[in-house]
Image (cartoon, coloured by chain):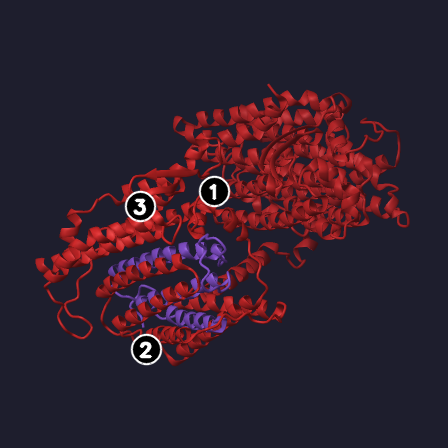
Chain colours: A red, B purple
Amino acid sequence: MNSNLLLLAIPGMAFATFLLPLLLQRFGRVAATVAAAAVIGTCLALVLRLAPAVFAGETQVARVHWLPTYGLDLGLRMDGLGLLFSLLICGIGLLVVLYAFYYLPGSDRMGRFYSILLLFMAAMLGVVLSENLLLLLVFWEITSLSSFLLVAYSHDKYESRIGARMALAVTGGGGLALLAGILLLGHIAGSYELSVILAAGDQIRAHALYIPTLILILLGAFTKSAQFPFHFWLPNAMSAPTPVSAYLHSATMVKAGVFLLARLHPALGGTDAWFWLVSGTGAVTLVYSAATALFRHDIKGLLAYSTISHLGLITLLFGLDTPLSIVAGVFHIINHAIFKASLFMAAGVIDHECGTRDMRRVNGMFKRMPITAALAIIAAGSMAGVPLLNGFLSKEMFFAETVGHPQFEAVSWLLPLVATIAGMLAVAYSLRFVHDVFFNGEPIDLPRQPHEPPRWMRAPIELLVLLCLLVGVFPGWTVAPLLDVAAAAALQAPLPEFELALWHGFNRPLMMSLLALAGGVFIYAMRGPLFAWQEQLPPLRPRTAFERGYRLLAGAARRLVALLDNGSLQRYNALLFSFILVLGSWAFFSGPAATVRLPSQPAGEAAYLALFALLVGSMGGTLLYRKRLLAVILVGIVGLIVALIFVRLSAPDLALTQLAVETGTIILMLLVLYFLPVREAPRSSASRLTRDLLLAMFAGGGMALITLQMLAAPFATISGFYLREAVPGGGGTNVVNVILVDFRGFDTLGEITVLALVALASHALLDRLILTAPRLDSDGRPWSSEAHPLFLAMMMRPLLPLSLTISVYIFLRGHNVPGGGFVAGLITSVALVVQYLANGNVFAQRRMPRNSAGLLSLGLLLASGVGMASWLFERPFLTTAHGHVSLPLIGEFELASAMIFDLGVYVVVVTVVVTVLSGLGRLSARAHNQEAGN
Amino acid sequence: MEVLLSIAIGVLTACGVFLILRSRTFPVLLGLTLLSYAVNLFLFASGRLRIDAPPLIRAGASYADPLPQALVLTAIVIGFGMTAYLAILALRALSESGADHVDAHKGP
């Protein structure tokens, strides 16, 4: 198979199948476990299939275009670093699946657990295999979310929920910083592709935005890898089930941060800022967490702080920024993953068997579970850096790198000292773990009687410890090739000379190791006074501080929301208008002052008269809005004046549309008015009135000023094209209509779709809506029961064919003179609605097509169908054709395919107006029937 | 003419905004209608004011800008659709809450 396809299949397959365990759990826990193992096993097989090419030195990149305008492609990259991490993720993942099967109680059906675990694994594979940094970020966030779900797996426990929330807040916050950093990085490098970014190191480091970019990206990496001062989430995430801790919190997720350091080091590293920020953070984390680990009584707490300390060590190595330190960092990633995963699993076994993890009570386990004890002791030796184990090798390389680092020439003793102290502390806490748990007398008051765990629960630990030994004794035959390719990918440069060997001669690093061992034993021997001293220190409670901050923030957010979102539409509208006013004024006053002379069209007396009528209508309607009928009439006057304005200012199509719509609006308002309660609304308070009046006056004044400014500004239009092309291109002389149905036909299609939605929504809202018909009108007179005056009815019936003829005429001529689908549709619907008014629902209903949804579809189909028909002629959507047709009587006229489109518009408009208005009419009929029934 | 139209747009906006801020559904409906007039006129005016120059192709004629007219034409129809929808929404709210307050409660 194509290797690009294989590469895409790794995360693709994992994401496609992560729900399998959940789907299969009804066949039992075993089925869920097998499904999870099968998914991970397939991923591992795919990774191994791609491995030979990586060992041959190739970097494979596969890419599928996704959102190229945003620089976001599905780009994956398989190089040494990706291979190393994929192997860790899949390999340890398999072991964790087996381990979890025994760890979680038999009552747990496991499907949910495995599915989240697989989702996490898929995202993690995505992170380490991403070629595109934006894609990496997407996967990064999925790891944060899925780890939240995993930490909170036992969601009935308070501890789990708090721990999960904290982990999400810290890593999610870091993710935001990382997003900003990656956007900056992409901006600097001009691409989000790793290949480009890794090659643009010099350009990035020289850029003015380098420091902010670096800090933001480091924030993302440090929060994920639990570096000081963001470390506190990791110990609190220990409330997760132990398989999760073994997988996420030792081997994979917390390594995502240092992975990012390794990945981006060629682009961002090599500067003083990198050196001080990364190595400084690493060194502080290394020593601080090692010291804290010593004082934890909870086994998992000790391991968590030890993990933080080791992550600090890796960070420090990447910060030291010499070729060999990078190699050592990558090597320690491998070693730490192996021994720490096995230690967590061993801790889980102890917890599982004893029912507690408190080292003050769990003692003397060697007698009770000798095999597990032996395994844990070997792994702890690796953690302490004891020779013949893998941890020793990378620690030795670390010590070697601290000696004589070029940045520390003046204080060359400082770095080795820090390293040795950290080494001592690591030995001390490892010793504490081994001695307290497995020896140190007899257990105290255990809830359960501990013995060896089931055979296969121990198997993952055995395998990992075997790896510790194999790598520790035969590094050259085991890990060397993988380390070579991974380190080369992290360096993006030729590998330095180095030799993986147990014995380098009696040199400075070896002395430091021996010193660390001796010092560690000494510190552990002194634990009595040390613990007493630690007891009287003021307690550091990062969790309480975090909780307090969290509650403060949540409270402030709640108050802000309550202030803005109090459920009052009036408040929202007032805020909205104020906001628009502020923005508008800002733009108005900061923009260039208009110095252009106002063009002046002559205004005759008629114009003044129209303005006067408009003022009377609008202001009268506003002042008298409580007299509803009067207000409707006054607003109707305004609508007519607006139509007249269109007539005067050369917009005949608009005038026709406005007139027709005005009629519809008035009918609509009257129908609504009939139902609304007659009772007067109480007057608004004076302050509310003042506020609203001020807002209204500023809004009106602002609009008037902006209109003046706009009319005074120099005029440039793109309409020349439409005027030129209307006849040759669109086959019509009415440019407005040609624009609607031809040039901008796609917009119109969208608009009639919106109209169709209005009809559907209205239909749904009116469906089974029952309102009581009022008995009296607003003046206290009873409504007349004589619904349809005979005279009106008889007058209107013959008017229908007449008005329909007019609308057909308006429709047909629309392409060349004012008219068209919109106007004709409105006229037709008004004619039909008038029939309802004059003859009543019963009469009209019987004569109307019922299926409004069908008619809407017909209209939309006509419009889009004629658009799609152009595909048959291999033209783009909505290409029109036109030609001359000659008919007897009418003569020769131009027929355009746009006319069919216009017919669609017509059908939709008619259906919408008639549906809405007749629906309202039926409503009143129902109300009356109800009345009559009572 | 320009000044007159600006005044008209300003007054329509002011009346519309004031009515939209009322607490009952019916004045809000009226206010939206007035505000749509204002907005339509404003959009229309962005093509500048021309007299006796309809955008109908004839020999030797000058034309008003057809593009804002096309935009406003659909805006008028869509505006009607929106008003109708809101009207029906108001009736539905009346039937659900028994009041014509915009927040669907019987408060002041």
Q: Find disc 3 in the rendering and name its residue.
A: A907
> How far across and how far down the image is residue A101, in percent?
50, 29
**x, y percent for residue A654:** 39, 58
Q: Which residue shows up at 22% across the image and 71% down it?
A: A678
Residue A750 place in picture, x, y as percent: 42, 47
- Earlier-in-chain disc, 1 versus 3: 1
Q: Nearer the viewer, mark 1 or mark 2?
A: 2
- Mark 2 neighbour density, 10 Å: few (under 14) some (14–19) many (20 or more): few
Secondary structure, mark 1, is: loop
Q: Secondary structure at mark 2?
A: loop
Which chain does the residue under circle 1 lie in? A
Image position of A414 (left or right of A600): right
Whether residue A406 is visible: yes
Q: Residue flagged by tag 3: what amino acid is it? A: Val
Helix, strand or loop status at disc 3: helix
The disc at residue A735 is none
Q: Pick the quarter of the image with the C terminus of chain A.
A: bottom left
**Left-right relation of A816 to A709:** left
> Label 3 near label 1: C-beta < 8 Å?
no
Q: Residue at x 33, y 42 (%)?
A: A891
Please, what is the three-letter code of the amino acid marked with disc 2?
A: Arg
- Mark 2 and mark 3: Cα distance apart in space: 44 Å
| Disc 2: which residue | A683
Chain ID, mark 2:
A
Q: Which residue is mark 1?
A: A154
